[in-house]
Amino acid sequence: MITLACGVAWERERLSVVPPLGIALGLLGLVLLLGVIWTEPSTDSDVLWRGLATEITLALAATHASLVSIFGLRRRYRAVPLATYALNALLTATTLLWIWWEPDWDDAFGRLYGALIVLVIAATIAIPVLRRLDGPVVEAERSDTPVRFCPICGAVLDPPGAATCEVCGATFEVRVTTPQAPRG
């Protein structure tokens, strides 16, 4: 399931290598977890469990970044996804620190970790809310420039905007329809 957000981000060509990495890590984590569940390894080694937790943490971090990248925000809100990526990286690093070194920071580490989780969740929720507040994405403004080339053969139209191409004989018509905005 976690690879779905990565697939959408990869299809939209967002974040370069992060979405395919998230998909690979998600699938690897699934295979490793199922392998550990079914084989019931007879080792008490913490390395196996810490390695599995690390792999799943990295898969979730890549998936979260991919999910955040799906929403396009206007210029005035561009800092919000960047801050969310930074918080995601900080939370991931803190989680890995907790997995491998088990810091003995008593209550301070728990408070820091809890605060990071709350900030990541708040920033993640803010992104679709800001997107909704922005309203629909405005399409390019209408242009009064007439068509100058035949869409079939590419010949120059004379006069520009003509509906028939003298070279290939194609006749064409442009219809523009705009969908009604949903009410509610």
Image (tube, rainbow, N blue to C red):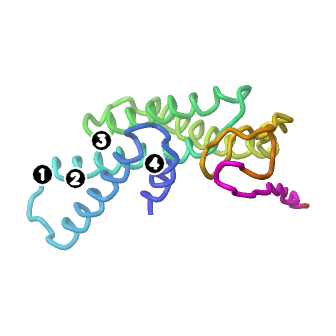
Q: Give the range drawn in magenta.
A: 166-182
Pointer 1: what residue? 45
What's the distance in space between the residues labelled 4 and 1, CA to CA? 36 Å
Front position among marks 2 and 4: 4
Pointer 4: what residue? 10
Pointer 3: what residue? 99
Does label 2 or label 4 sit earlier along the sequence? 4
- Measured as percent of width and height from the top left, residue 9 is found at 50, 48
> Where on the picture, by quarter, is residue 95?
top left
Mark 4 surroundings within 10 Å by alpha-carbon count, few (fewer than 14), some (14 through 19), many (20 or more): many
- Measured as percent of width and height from the top left, residue 40 is found at 15, 69
Q: Do the CB atoms of the residues marked 2 and 3 lie less than 8 Å apart? A: no
Res 75 seen here? yes
Pointer 2: what residue? 49
Mark 2 surroundings within 10 Å by alpha-carbon count, few (fewer than 14), some (14 through 19), many (20 or more): some
Q: Which residue is drawn at 19% across and 65% down?
A: 36
